[in-house]
Every structure is written in structure tokens, then in C-alpha cells.
Image (tube, rainbow, N blue to C red):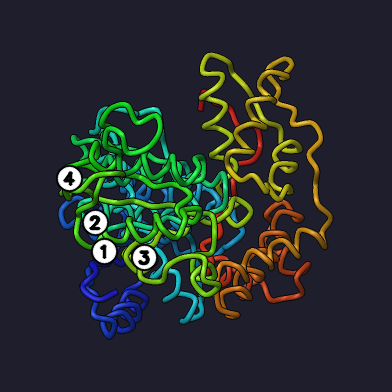
Amino acid sequence: MKNKSILIVDDEAFMRKNIIDLLSSKGCRLSEAADGDEAIEKVSSSKPDLVLLDINLPKTDGLTALGEIKRILPDLPVIVFTAYGTSERAIKAMKAGAYDYIEKPFELDQFLLIIQRALEFSELLGEVKELRNKVSTISGDDDVHIIGSSSQMKEIFKLIGRVAPSDATVLIRGESGTGKELIADAIQRHSLRKKEAYVKVNCGGLSDSILESEIFGHEKGAFTGAIAQRQGRFELADGGTIFLDEIDTMSPSLQVRLLRVLEQQTFYRVGGEDPIHVDIRVIAATNSDLEKEVKEGRFREDLFYRLNVVRINIPPLSQRKEDIPILVKYFLQKYCPDRRLVVPYSEMEKLLSYTWPGNVRELENTIQSATVMARENIISIGSLPIASKGERFEIAVEQQLESGKSLRDILARIEKDLILHALRKNNWNRTEAAKYLQIHRRLLYTKILEFGIQQPQMMDIDIDD
């Protein structure tokens, strides 16, 4: 909270004083307003980082003031105070764009946590917006997007924004179908080499001898069939970027040669005697646990460290199901841009219940098939091989363990999944979900904030929205 500007809007002077006394110790820059008119004026003039707004205000009431504040600064987080947490006015405040609301009297820890979350959300929104602005200014494959609104994907967006302008080698790890190539493409599009060559090699799709020739090129007569000199992919990528997919399938001899390129930026063509110097950036991808491959002697440790300068781990779709509704909408737009298609709640529940072993690629294929079979513009998913609850739990735990996460992180993920299950089962009614989990509603509310859980828009996804 340090150095953050917070505007406190309440008609009760003692309430403003209490909040100022509390937040002053956190290093915040604080201002206050006693009514809605004054709040609107101060938002317009000082542009604070956060507004704490009482819903009951003289002159211009809180709801009206909220609407005007969001018109002036749409991304400004506003936390609403209300003495009637379940009232129609509190609901209207959330619909009008409030970040959250808190009931009076409130618990100190809960109050500070909500403020911290709101400020973090504001910073993250700014970073994601900046990255999206960069994407929109780049020509080329504008129809290729990385889709996701989950906290995991937002962190990946931020990491792409930080690493792309550098020349650092990047290692992308993720299961098949998670979009590793899309991540590599995004890094290249935002890099300083974006106007230079961008060469891709699937290391798992070729035999060792052919892959060696493909990557490093060969001289005339180097082997049977080498009737002319040929440039390799590294040579063609000189000045630009090379993407090496399925890097874990590379043979030990090729690993040695790749290590030399990374260390010295030089290599020899097959059958060649003169070193070739190149200036390239390397992005590699794998769906394997390279640390395990190193321990078992199948992958060189020195090469792993050269590749693992910056690591991007893409979570499987089963660990970021919040992204499924937005992915579904994107694929509907992709395959049926001229049709008005709707996904009923029951069909979205099928998608959210499935484990998606094929990840985003499998989801895309499923939606593409559903668009072909859709009747009267209603999407019907049909039957999916839904795993039993026990199987889903075992799969989730195995994925967490293989990801190298600590016990604390795994337990936190399981706790989040349990909370999501309770919320879905009770139609996102927090009170009923808390009863279902046999915990206090305030504890559930705190956990929702802690895990950044947001209700997905599952009902009637309309691609014209």
C-alpha cells in the first residue's frame, strides 16, 4: 500500500478519521470527501489509486457517485461501504462496477486484505492492458491470441512482457496442447528482433541425422544424397529467433552441438570445416520434466542451465478452468463469426467438469465439432468421457506433484478447487457454499479474495456480446 493514493468518501467524520489513522501507518497518501459531489471532483482532479466509498451519502448518493467515478476512470477500483450487505443497493453497486463491498462494522484484517487485493488488481490490470496495447500495434498474425483471464495466465502475460524485449534464452514447459508455440510466438512478436527471421524446428518430428542436417545445414558431398550445400535453420535464423520445440527429444550428440551454439554462437555444417557465426535468440519448449531427464542422464545438465535462463510454465487447462468460458467464446467466434450461438448453462457445466487431458487443443476441437452439430444456434456438447471424482482427484494430485510444487502449494490448490466446487454446486451463493463446506462465511469470503476466485460467465455465452 505504500505511496498509494486512496480517497475516503464518508459523510461521518469519525469514520473518515478512523480509516485515515489506520491507513496512515501503511504509508498511504490519503484524501477525504464528505459527499458524492466532492468525491467526483477529487477523483477527476487527483486521480487516486483507490476509492473507499460509502453508499449512503448526502447530495449525490453513493450509487450515482460510483457511476460518475467509473465514467471518469473506468479502471479505478472502488470499494463500497454498506450497512446492508445483502441489500439491493449493494448488488446494484457491484453491477455498477464496484470492485467489492464491505459491511459495516467490518473486521480490520478483512478490510486491509480487500484494499490490498484491490490495489494489486489495479496494478495487474494496468500491466495486462499495456501488454494488450502492444499486441494490438503489431501487424502480422493478429488472429493468433493467447486466451486466458485466470491468475496463472495473467502472470504469464506479465512475464512475456518483461522477457520479450531482452535476448534471454527462454524455456517453455507445458503439457501437449497447452499452447507452448503461441507463447513463443508472443515473445517473438514483442521482441526487438520481431522484424527479423523467425524459424521453427520440431525436434521430435525428425530422425537424428535429418534433424542435424536441418538445424546445422550440410556441405555438398557430406553424405549420400547431399548433392549441394544447404543452409541450416540456425543459419537462416541469423539476426532473428529460432524456436526449438520438443527439445527433450534431441539426441546427446546434438545436445553437445546445441550447447556450443548457445555458448559461442558458432557451429559447423555437417561435413564442414569452417565455423559459422550467428546472432540468434533461442526459445525452446518441452512437455517433459527436464530436471528429471537430467537426473536420469537423458539430458545434459549444462545444456539445461543454458536453456533455463527464463522459465515459463504453462498450467494444464484442468488447473485453470476459469479460462474455459472465455476460450469457448473465442473458439465460437473463430469458427462461426457470422452466427449467433448460445452455450446453455448445462453444456458449460459439462465443459467445466471434464479433465481435458488434451488441454486447449482438445477444447478447441470439441467446440469446432459442436458448432457443426449445433441446431437452432444452440451449442450441445454431447457426451464427454467424464472421469469419476476419484480419478479426477488422482489426476489433479499427480499433475501437481509432477510440476515440482511444494506441499503447501499443492494443498492451497486443492483448497481452491474445493471452494470452487462448493460455489458451483450452490450456484455461487457464498452463504450456502460456506454451509456446504462447514466454515464461517467470512472465512470463505477471505479465501475467495486470497485465491482470486471470480464467478465465470457460464450462462448463455453469446458471441455477439
Cα gap from disc 2 to disc 3, whole angstroms: 62 Å
Q: Which of marks 2 and 3 is nearer the N terminus?
A: 2
Q: Are marks 1 and 3 in contact (CB under 8 Å)?
A: no
- Residue carrying label 3: 303
Which amino acid, mark 4? Leu
Q: Do the residues labelled 4 and 2 touch (CB within 8 Å)?
A: no
Q: Where is residue 157 in the image (x, y as percent from the top left)?
A: 37, 52
Q: Which of marks 4 and 2 is nearer the N terminus?
A: 2
- Residue lying at 55% horizontally and 32% vertically, measured from the top left: 329
Cα gap from disc 1 to disc 2, whole angstroms: 6 Å
- Residue carrying label 4: 192
Cα gap from disc 3 to disc 4, whole angstroms: 25 Å
Q: Residue 33 carries which label?
A: 1
- Residue carrying label 2: 38
The residue mark sitting in front, 4 or 2, is: 4
Which amino acid, mark 2? Glu
Front residue of this view, candidates 20 and 147: 147
Which amino acid, mark 1? Ala
The reply to whether residue 352 is in sight is yes
Q: Do the residues labelled 1 and 2 touch (CB within 8 Å)?
A: yes
Q: Which quadrant of the structure image shows residue 288?
A: bottom right
Q: Is residue 276 above or below residue 464?
A: below
The reply to whether residue 60 is in sight is no
Q: Is residue 126 left or right of residue 324?
A: left
Which amino acid, mark 3? Leu
